[in-house]
Amino acid sequence: MTWAEHKNVSGIFSPKINDKRVFMDASMKTVFHMEAEGQEESIAVGKYLFSKNSFLKAEKILQAAAEHKSTEWLIIDEIGPLELKGKGFCNVLKGILQVQHSFKIVLVVRAQLTEDVKTFFDLTETLVFKPD
């Protein structure tokens, strides 16, 4: 998020706030829950239950950002085990990658999953950036 402060960035961040993972709209800075609450429909990954509705909201933000003419950087935080199972941001990312666009895409990926993500999404033009 520090890297993006002075850039025209759209998309989704997933910071921890008060020890809870949340989604944050990168351009509007609005925050909404990531973890499933109560009896809401969820997506299970290991011991975690994520809100299906929140993922759908995040996907809409990503899709809108991809369609917006002024987007310079599109960030998706993060691409990980969920996406490698065809869930989470998998479909929206595949859709974005299939269309020619003028913006750059930044995917936040755990170091140990980088090669798996590159293979799964057929990413050939990659630059690995590791912040200080």
Image (tube, rainbow, N blue to C red):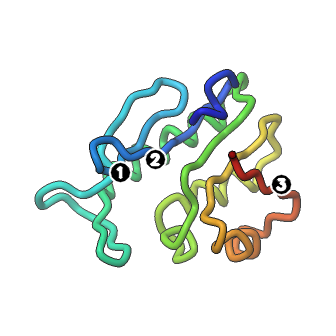
Residue 130 or residue 121, whichever sits in front: 130
Name the residue that disc number 3 marks: 127
Residue at (68, 24) in percent of width and height = 8
Secondary structure found at label 1: strand
Residue 23 or residue 95, whichever sits in front: 23
Q: Earlier in the sequence, mark 2 or mark 3?
A: 2
Q: Where does the image place residue 107, in percent across and percent down from the top left? A: 66, 53
Residue at (66, 34) in percent of width and height = 3
Q: Earlier in the sequence, mark 1 or mark 3?
A: 1
Q: Residue furthest front?
A: 132
What's the distance in space between the residues labelled 1 and 3, CA to CA?
A: 26 Å
Q: Amino acid at mark 2?
A: Ser
Secondary structure found at label 2: loop
Residue 42 or residue 16, whichever sits in front: 16
> In the figure, residue 44 lies in which quadrant?
bottom left
Q: Residues within 10 Å of mark 3 (few under 14, many from 20)?
A: few
Q: Amino acid at mark 3?
A: Leu
Q: Is residue 112 left or right of residue 15?
A: right
Q: Where does the image place residue 2, in percent across and percent down from the top left? A: 60, 33
Would you place residue 102 above or below residue 54 in this image?
A: above
Q: Where does the image place residue 110, in percent across and percent down from the top left? A: 60, 64
Q: Residues within 10 Å of mark 2 (few under 14, many from 20)?
A: many
Residue at (53, 58) in percent of width and height = 89
Q: Are marks 2 and 3 in contact (CB under 8 Å)?
A: no
Q: Are marks 1 and 2 in contact (CB under 8 Å)?
A: yes
Q: Amino acid at mark 1?
A: Arg
What's the distance in space between the residues labelled 1 and 2, CA to CA?
A: 6 Å
Q: Where does the image place residue 27, in percent across and percent down from the top left? A: 54, 26
Task: Give the number of the disc on residue 14.
Answer: 2
Name the residue that disc number 1 marks: 21
